[in-house]
Image: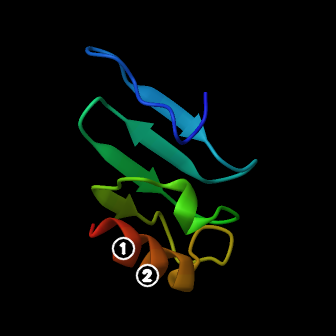
Amino acid sequence: MTIEESPSKNEVFFVWFNRYAGVAIKTPTKTIVIDPVDVKARDFKAVDAVLITHEHYDHLDQPLVSEIQKMTNC
């Protein structure tokens, strides 16, 4: 499963995009990204919310979060 894939009706995807923090929770209509680090903003086609668990560098990349927000209007 990849960030680009979308779940079918009644499915929820948990997509890990690095080895220690980042995950996307996807339903057929919503995507929540948690701790986006070590990933490209362009990998996300649609994002409804970004959740940061805490401010350490391996969980928060502020320029990346800003880029995701601009690219997806979240």
Q: Relative to 34, say whether 7 is above or below.
A: above
Q: Position of residue 48 (x, y in %)?
A: 27, 55
Mark 2, secondary structure of its residue: helix
| Labelled disc at residue 57 | none
Please report contact status of discs 2 and 1: CB closer than 8 Å, yes or no: yes
Q: Determine which residue is flagged by label 2.
A: 66
Mark 1, secondary structure of its residue: helix
Q: Relative to 56, say whether 63 is above or below.
A: below
Which quadrant would the N terminus be assigned to in this image? top right
Q: Position of residue 53 (x, y in %)?
A: 47, 63
- The colour scheme of the drawn protein is rainbow
- Residue at position x 36%, y 78% from top? 70
Count the labels in the image. 2
Query: Looking at the image, which residue sits at the far bottom?
Result: 63
Q: Position of residue 6 (x, y in %)?
A: 42, 30
| Labelled disc at residue 69 | 1
Q: Amino acid at mark 2?
A: Ser
Asked if residue 34 lies left or right of residue 38, the reply is left
Q: Report, in whole angstroms, how far the alpha carbon at label 2 lies from the one at label 1.
A: 5 Å
Q: Nearer the viewer, residue 19 or 42?
A: 42
The residue carrying pointer 1 sits among few (fewer than 14), some (14 to 19) or many (20 or more) residues within 10 Å by Cα, namely: some
Which quadrant would the C terminus be assigned to in this image? bottom left
Q: Position of residue 18 (x, y in %)?
A: 71, 50
- Residue at position x 56%, y 55% from top? 43
Q: Relative to 7, say whether 30 is above or below.
A: below
- Residue at position x 55%, y 77% from top? 64
Q: Nearer the viewer, residue 64 or 59?
A: 64
Find residue 72 and report its image quarter: bottom left
Asked if residue 6 lies left or right of residue 37, the reply is left
Q: Amino acid at mark 1?
A: Gln
- Residue at position x 23%, y 36% from top? 29
